[in-house]
Image (cartoon, rainbow, N blue to C red):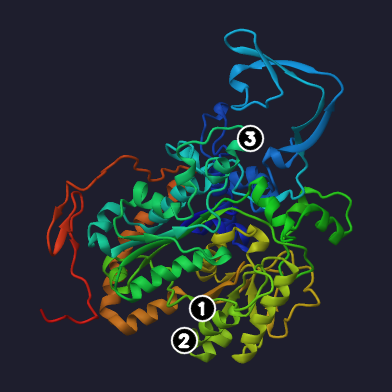
């Protein structure tokens, strides 16, 4: 697993630890704070007068704790455009000149087709004089608009994924992709070149994307705005804006993969949609190793405004009205996301999350450090709807199927007593009613009395297509520590929440789970739920299938993998990152291949691509 979100990096469970930091043992708490300080570019040693000696975790935690707490998770947006500087904009206006107006300007600034009534005279080679006659004319007046939404789940302050590799005008989501995928590879304990050479190149796949595409200035946002802002479109904005570009970047610059690729978009369920592609490929035997992920960077004025006018976001005015406040402090902004409580909208966020999937035989053969298992991902639509953005009925089916499968694998008693929900939990009034009814109904149908519910968006915000990735990574942290994150903004459960069979709690708590249900309810009727099995359950299933001798050999191989994981974690803890970015390396265009009827040899790949394909259609006699 690997990634980056408002709580930190995914590897080493840093992000999860940040969300439950007040429930951690003291040593782990100090380790987490010092690691976040390194990630955020804070000084990790004494000054020159003390010869720059490194500080230990306890000293670093004491020095940086306040800063780390204030500059991670949901908080006031730190982009100047959302503060006093204001959002650059233009306002249309009709103006009337009482007398002709003459101005001088650069010849290059003249419109390509000036209005016919303008009188233009040459001043010199570079400048002209323009006289506009008296009368009415249309203008755009520049202005700075006050941001109406000032809170978001931002990556930790001081962390810039583009600063760690040779990024040249990459959209933010793609820089996050490079970092997150590299974090995943590093945490795996495998060296990618060695790992990939053990497989037919076509046994590897990459499914990664995002829910919106790249809409910042370096992607489609800059492209679409180029004419009205007077900026030039660049050759990169069009291709880099596509929603499947995270997968393309992995293939071209990180993995060099020639296997299956693509992205399946499903609004807020996008991570689970891509996860299903990987799970299906492995279950069908089409692939043996799949990289799955999403990267979303939607904190731009235009996207924020788009969600605000839908009445989907917790804007400042609504939060003030909800809490009867005249001004919002930094502490108020940290508490704007309130799943299942009295709330007024979701909080937008950015995140990139990646997981490495393997078939069980390959995982045992390599000594992979197995974090859990996903047996299936269920996806269902809502059917007929009034509003395309309103919730519907599909989530009852996805969650119901997930619980049925988990009960079949683990037994009904295990699901009743040792399962919990990672809810979509957006913090909108509509979601708290509709999702709680889904959860409560499925709990009732399965005899579950008090089903624990986590809602990680209270800490991280809603990262759109990456949201379920945030939930899955949090669940892996809960498996590791036995801690469930409480909904810290849940001062009281809202009156309209259907919670008779649900356990909605504020404080972190100890809970040993066999399965976590990762739930997503996306705009447009994109519902998905995945049962995530704990590593202990996964090992029991593997033992049942492969035998104890195979598991003993796997544990021996895993020791070397865990040693490499520890080395990667030690470097990451110090804020020393070297993302994989192989621009222009090993480029092939076709003539270099050895093309046969049964296989294709690719220079640089140890095994050939087999062209033997399954034919379920029969053969015609010739």
Circle 1 residue: 515
Look at the numbered disc 2 and give the secondary structure of its residue. helix
Which is more toward the observer, 142 or 509? Answer: 142
Q: Residues within 10 Å of mark 1 (few under 14, many from 20)?
A: many
Q: Are marks 3 and 2 in contact (CB under 8 Å)?
A: no
Horizontal and vertical percent position of residue 346: 70, 61
Q: CA distance from mark 3 to mark 2?
A: 58 Å
Q: Is residue 310 above or below residue 125?
A: below
Look at the numbered disc 3 and give the secondary structure of its residue. helix
Q: Are marks 1 and 3 in contact (CB under 8 Å)?
A: no
Circle 3 residue: 229
The N terminus sits in image quarter: bottom left
State left or right for residue 606 relative to residue 285.
Answer: left
Q: Earlier in the sequence, mark 1 or mark 3?
A: 3
Q: Are marks 1 and 2 in contact (CB under 8 Å)?
A: yes
Circle 2 residue: 410
Horizontal and vertical percent position of residue 556: 29, 67
Horizontal and vertical percent position of residue 218: 53, 40
Q: CA distance from mark 1 to mark 2?
A: 9 Å
Which is more toward the observer, 559 or 189? Answer: 189
């Amino acid at each position: 697993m690997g990634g980056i979100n408002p709580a930190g990096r995914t590897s080493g469970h840093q992000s999860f630890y940040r969300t439950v930091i007040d429930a951690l043992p003291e040593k782990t708490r100090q380790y987490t704070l010092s690691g976040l300080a390194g990630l955020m570019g804070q000084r990790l040693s004494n000054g020159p007068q003390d010869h720059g000696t490194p500080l230990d975790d306890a000293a670093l935690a004491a020095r940086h704790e306040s800063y780390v707490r204030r500059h991670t998770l949901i908080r006031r947006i730190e982009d100047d455009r959302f503060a006093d500087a204001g959002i650059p904009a233009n306002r249309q206006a009709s103006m009337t000149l009482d007398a002709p107006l003459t101005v001088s300007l650069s010849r290059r600034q003249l419109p390509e087709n000036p209005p016919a009534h303008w009188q233009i005279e040459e001043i010199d080679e570079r400048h002209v004089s323009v006289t506009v006659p008296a009368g009415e004319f249309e203008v755009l007046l520049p202005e700075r608009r006050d941001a109406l939404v000032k809170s978001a789940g931002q990556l930790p302050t001081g962390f810039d994924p583009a600063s760690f590799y040779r990024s040249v005008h990459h959209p933010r989501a793609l820089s996050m992709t490079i970092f997150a995928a590299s974090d995943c590879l590093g945490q795996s304990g495998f060296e990618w070149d060695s790992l990939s050479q053990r497989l037919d190149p076509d046994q590897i796949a990459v499914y990664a994307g995002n829910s919106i595409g790249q809409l910042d200035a370096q992607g489609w946002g800059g492209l679409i705005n180029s004419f009205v802002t007077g900026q030039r479109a660049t050759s990169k904005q069009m291709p880099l804006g596509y929603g499947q570009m995270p997968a393309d970047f992995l293939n071209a610059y990180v993995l060099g993969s020639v296997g299956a690729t693509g992205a399946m978009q499903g609004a807020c369920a996008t991570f689970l949609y891509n996860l299903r592609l990987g799970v299906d490929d492995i279950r069908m035997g089409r692939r043996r190793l799949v990289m799955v992920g999403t990267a979303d960077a939607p904190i731009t004025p235009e996207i924020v405004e788009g969600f605000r006018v839908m009445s989907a976001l917790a804007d400042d005015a609504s939060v003030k009205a909800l809490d009867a406040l005249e001004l919002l402090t930094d502490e108020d902004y940290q508490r704007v996301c309130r799943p299942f409580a009295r709330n007024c909208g979701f909080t937008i966020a950015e995140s990139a999350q990646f997981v490495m999937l393997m078939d069980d035989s390959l995982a045992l053969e390599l000594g992979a450090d197995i974090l859990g298992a996903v047996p299936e991902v269920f996806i269902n639509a809502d059917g007929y709807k009034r509003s395309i953005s309103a919730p519907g009925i599909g989530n009852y089916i996805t969650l119901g199927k997930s619980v049925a499968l988990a009960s079949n694998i683990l037994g009904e008693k295990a699901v009743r007593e040792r399962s919990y929900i990672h809810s979509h939990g957006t913090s909108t009034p509509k979601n708290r009613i509709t999702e709680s009814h889904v959860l409560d109904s499925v709990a009732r149908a399965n005899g579950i009395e008090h089903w624990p519910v986590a809602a990680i968006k209270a800490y991280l915000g809603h990262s759109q297509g990456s949201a379920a990735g945030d939930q899955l990574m949090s669940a892996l942290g809960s498996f590791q520590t036995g801690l469930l994150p409480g909904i810290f903004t849940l001062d009281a459960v809202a009156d309209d929440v259907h919670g008779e069979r649900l356990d909605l709690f504020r404080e972190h708590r100890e809970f040993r789970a066999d399965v976590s249900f990762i739930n997503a309810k996306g705009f447009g009727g994109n519902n998905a739920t995945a049962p995530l099995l704990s590593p202990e359950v996964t090992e029991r299933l593997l033992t049942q299938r492969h035998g104890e001798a195979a598991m003993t050999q796997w544990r021996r191989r895993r020791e070397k993998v865990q040693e490499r994981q520890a080395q990667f974690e030690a470097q990451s803890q110090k804020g020393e990152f070297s993302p994989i970015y192989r621009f222009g390396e090993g480029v092939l265009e076709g003539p270099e291949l050895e093309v046969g009827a049964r296989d294709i040899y690719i220079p640089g790949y140890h095994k050939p691509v087999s062209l033997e394909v399954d034919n379920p259609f029969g053969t015609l006699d010739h």
